[in-house]
């Protein structure tokens, strides 16, 4: 493969020029892709998120969508990282960031070229990303094009900025175009993106204060990934912030973000559900704000309630025999009240371990009960391997790189990272195995990231509880060894008693469909289908894109996932509102 920077750049430019010239010519286009290549299009040509695998499938799909979208102007972007040699998913390749445009928008992309041994080592596309960044005529007003504020800053008799904000927030004489349910990172990122596209958006959240969805979590909680990965759109964390952000600090930042970004946010507001009128293209929904019912008619609802929605309370018939308090991990606050007491924590995911450690640190005697095999990785350095690219380059480039990797190659990458982390964590993992802790490494060894993407949990980033277990400071029991619960605690099958004053169920959350069914009924829930996970496809199901229910969208995930994908979700809604795509089209009709 080429070594000189200039030769690498020429190779990338040459491929992009050949690609643009070949659009519409199947024979020419076929010569540019490996047989086992991937194309991920994110809203740019398909108006949805899709991954196409295999050269023949790419050519077929690209032909149809390129005819409609008319992409052109493919060129290496000189403002981004220069074309370079990198290794992705274990494969050496040339990687180049490029820009292009379509009839309706402008986009960015990434091409990765590798030599095709079957064709004289000619450089061909291994992966291709095309991602929409803006719609023509509806560009975000940022930097040099930012609003000037001339009206309220110069009209001494008119309303000032605060008057306008109060009127906007009240919704006294209008309905929001978009109603976002949930005010965590997913809701805030989406609202910020929509505001920049001049889409009237209201966030509703049942908590009393912005940020309470983090603020009210257990006392010791700190983010498990590093600060440079977790920024929200448009407003980066200050450079002096700690590497790992405490929950209350993040919650306060959310509050500041809402104010600074001028987001319309109703706290203390319960979303009670709604129905969709296809003829009018809008919803009729009920919200209850501080005890008063309000009917709203948004055209879109974005469910931003997160992967973790309704607590999962497993059916353990004998648990009713226990005489002490039983609470879900979402209800747990602080261990200080349990000093000198005995606690059983059921579940060995991140919350279970953290709560056990918090109780132990507060002076409680703790037994952690394992229900199923669990992946454990030390928070440093192993758990941070997945974010290594974010320690170099710009946030914009790294977000595009993250977007560009098709799921099968991302999975392959995480298999490799899991193998590396097992070597780094060998001492910890061996110690856990010695005490009977049952370890897992994800389906096919794909690690914690895919456990999160498929089931929302099943792993622990070790910040000290593993050492407590290994030393015996926190006791370990297997749920399968429990005969049943009695008034005093857990009776084991060998007849011994694990005494307890408190039982915490760190047993995860129900799939998001349960909340959708509760709010919208069986018809809409069945129409939408499963949410999150991959199913038979290579994209997260019903996430960040149109669903089969018009006007109903879903966004969830980490701060990074929400920062990245909120842009694409907002652009899709804007395109619908401006008539660039039909309002009632099914997802399959767009591709």
Image (tube, grey):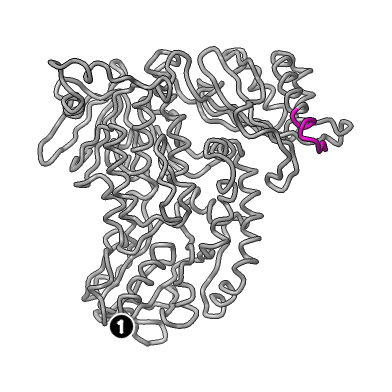
Asked whether 73 or 410 is in front, the reply is 73
Tell me the residue at 72%/26% (across/down): 56
Label total for image = 1
- Residue lying furthest right: 120
- Residue lying furthest left: 292
Residue 197 vertical placement versus 269 (above, below): above
Residue 153 vertical placement versus 369 (above, below): above
Tell me the residue at 36%/63% (across/down): 506
Q: Please indicate whether residue 123 sits to the left or right of residue 529 in the image.
A: right
What kind of element bears circle 1? Answer: strand
Residue 109 vertical placement versus 477 (above, below): above
User: Within the image, what quadrant is residue 529 found in?
Assistant: top left
User: Within the image, what quadrant is residue 410 found in?
Assistant: top right
Residue 464 vertical placement versus 196 (above, below): below
Q: Looking at the figure, which quarter contains the C terminus? A: top right
User: Within the image, what quadrant is residue 397 found in?
Assistant: top right
Tell me the residue at 53%/42% (across/down): 535
Q: Please indicate whether residue 139 sits to the left or right of residue 2 in the image.
A: left
Magenta part of the chain: 1-9
Return the residue at label 1.
Answer: 499
Residue 156 coordinates in the image, percent (x, y): 15, 17
Q: Looking at the figure, which quarter contains the N terminus? A: top right
Tell me the residue at 43%/30% (across/down): 569
Asked whether 204 or 310 is in front, the reply is 204
Residue 322 coordinates in the image, percent (x, y): 25, 75
Residue 568 coordinates in the image, percent (x, y): 46, 29
Report crowding for label 1: few under 14, some 14 to 19, many 20 or more residues within 10 A (C-alpha): many
Q: Please indicate whether residue 238 sits to the left or right of residue 343 in the image.
A: right
């Amino acid at each position: 493969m080429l070594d000189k920077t200039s030769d690498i750049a020429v190779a990338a430019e040459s491929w992009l020029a050949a690609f643009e010239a070949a659009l519409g010519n199947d024979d020419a286009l076929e010569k540019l892709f490996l047989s086992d290549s991937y194309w991920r299009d994110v809203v740019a040509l398909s108006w949805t998120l899709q991954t196409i695998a295999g050269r023949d499938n790419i050519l077929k799909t690209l032909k149809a969508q390129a005819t409609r979208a008319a992409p052109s102007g493919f060129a290496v972007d000189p403002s981004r990282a220069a074309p370079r040699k990198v290794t992705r998913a274990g494969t050496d390749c040339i990687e180049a960031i490029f820009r292009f445009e379509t009839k309706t928008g402008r986009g960015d992309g990434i091409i990765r070229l590798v030599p095709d041994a079957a064709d004289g080592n000619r450089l061909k596309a291994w992966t291709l990303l095309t991602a929409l960044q803006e719609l023509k005529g509806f560009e975000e007003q940022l930097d040099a094009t930012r609003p000037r504020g001339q009206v309220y800053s110069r009209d001494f008799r008119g309303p000032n900025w605060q008057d306008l904000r109060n009127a906007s927030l009240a919704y006294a004489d209008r309905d929001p175009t978009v109603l976002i349910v949930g005010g965590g990172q997913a809701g805030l990122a989406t609202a910020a993106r929509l505001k920049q596209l001049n889409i009237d958006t209201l966030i509703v959240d049942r908590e009393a204060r912005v940020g309470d969805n983090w603020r009210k979590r257990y006392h010791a909680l700190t983010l498990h990934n590093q600060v440079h990965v977790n920024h929200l759109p448009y407003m980066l964390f200050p450079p002096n912030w700690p590497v790992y952000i405490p929950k209350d600090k993040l919650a306060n930042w959310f509050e500041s973000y809402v104010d600074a970004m001028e987001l319309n946010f109703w706290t203390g507001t319960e979303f009670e559900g709604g129905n969709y009128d296809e003829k009018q293209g809008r919803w009729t929904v009920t919200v209850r704000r501080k005890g008063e019912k309000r009917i709203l008619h948004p055209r879109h609802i974005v469910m931003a309630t997160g992967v973790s929605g309704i607590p999962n309370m497993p059916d353990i018939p004998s648990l009713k025999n226990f005489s002490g308090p039983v609470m879900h991990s979402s209800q747990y606050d602080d261990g200080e009240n349990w000093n000198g007491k005995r606690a059983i924590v059921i579940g060995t995911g991140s919350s279970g371990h953290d709560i056990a450690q918090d109780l132990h640190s507060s002076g409680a005697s703790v037994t952690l009960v394992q229900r199923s095999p669990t992946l454990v990785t030390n928070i440093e350095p192993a758990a941070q391997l997945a974010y290594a690219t974010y320690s170099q380059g710009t946030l914009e480039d790294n977000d595009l790189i993250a977007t560009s990797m098709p799921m099968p190659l991302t999975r392959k990458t995480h298999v490799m990272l899991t193998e590396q982390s097992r070597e780094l964590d060998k001492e910890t993992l061996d110690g856990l195995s010695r005490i009977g802790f049952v370890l897992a490494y994800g389906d096919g060894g794909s690690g914690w990231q895919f456990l999160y993407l498929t089931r929302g949990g099943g792993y622990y980033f070790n910040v000290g509880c593993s050492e407590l277990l290994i030393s015996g400071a926190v006791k370990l029991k297997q749920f399968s060894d429990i005969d049943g619960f009695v008034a005093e605690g857990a009776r084991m099958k060998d007849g011994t008693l694990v005494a307890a004053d408190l039982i915490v169920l760190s047993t995860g959350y129900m799939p998001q469909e349960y909340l959708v069914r509760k709010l919208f009924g069986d018809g809409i829930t069945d129409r939408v289908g499963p949410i999150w996970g991959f199913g038979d496809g290579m994209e997260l199901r019903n996430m960040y894109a149109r669903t089969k229910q018009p006007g109903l969208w879903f966004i969830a995930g980490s701060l990074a996932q929400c920062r990245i994908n909120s842009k694409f979700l907002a652009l899709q809604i804007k395109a619908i509102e401006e008539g660039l795509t039909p309002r009632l089209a099914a997802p399959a009709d767009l591709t």
